[in-house]
Amino acid sequence: MLFSKILVAYDGSDLSKKALKRAVELVQEQSHSLHPPRLEIIHVYAVPTFVGSEYAVNINYIEAAEATIQEAKSLIPSTLNVKFTLTRGQPAYTILAHAEEIGCDLIVMGSRGLGKIREFFLGSVSHNVVQQAKVPVLIVK
């Protein structure tokens, strides 16, 4: 199966590292084709809202998010040309909106494994993306 643009949702978890590794493999498998796929990695961070010093809290979350992107960069072979996107928002919605905006034809992400009760009430990011995506989604376990 050939893809032209692959989006990886990366949050620094072990499962997202496995998803990133699988996406890199998919790109490398197609690297000798006439139009090799482009790879984009997105990290979506959310800042909880509460009364207090919001500025200081935002800085800490932004620094952690930037460190997560740097970690993803360190996992990519230097031979690949990859675009990295760091953005704030609700993860599932933001991943889906970004996927549509860039015209990707595959989303790759790790499964979260929240547990049955928590997932029933909250839902997981991967579950929401799978349910609402307009393109195939590869869930890596």
Image: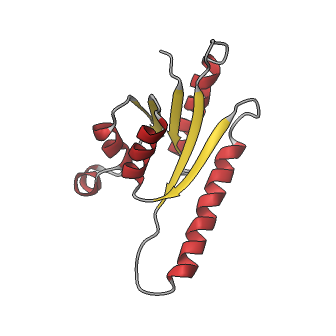
Q: At 69% from the left edge and 37% from the top edge, which residue is drawn?
A: 76
Query: Is residue 110 at all visible to an observer of this figure?
Result: no
Find residue 15 and report its horizontal and vertical position in percent.
Answer: 51, 43
In this rendering, position of residue 86 left or right of residue 136:
right
Find residue 83 and report its horizontal and vertical position in percent.
Answer: 63, 41
Give the quadrant of residue 128: top left
* Vertical position of residue 46 compared to residue 70: above or below: below
Find residue 96 and report its horizontal and vertical position in percent.
Answer: 39, 44
Q: At 75% from the left edge and 29% from the top edge, which residue is drawn?
A: 79
Find residue 121 and report its horizontal and vertical position in percent.
Answer: 23, 57
Which residue, as the protein is rendered here, is positioned at the far bottom?
52
Query: Is residue 43 at all visible to an observer of this figure?
Result: yes
In this rendering, position of residue 22 left or right of residue 112:
right
Q: 12 or 36, which lies in front? A: 36
Q: At 32% from the left edge and 43% from the top edge, which residue is drawn?
A: 127
Which residue, as the protein is rendered here, is positioned at the far right?
78
Q: 4 or 21, which lies in front? A: 4
Q: How is the image coloured?
A: secondary structure
Q: At 37% from the left edge and 30% from the top edge, which residue is drawn?
A: 135
In which quadrant is the C terminus drawn? top left
* Vertical position of residue 45 compared to residue 2: above or below: below
In this rendering, position of residue 92 left or right of residue 29:
left
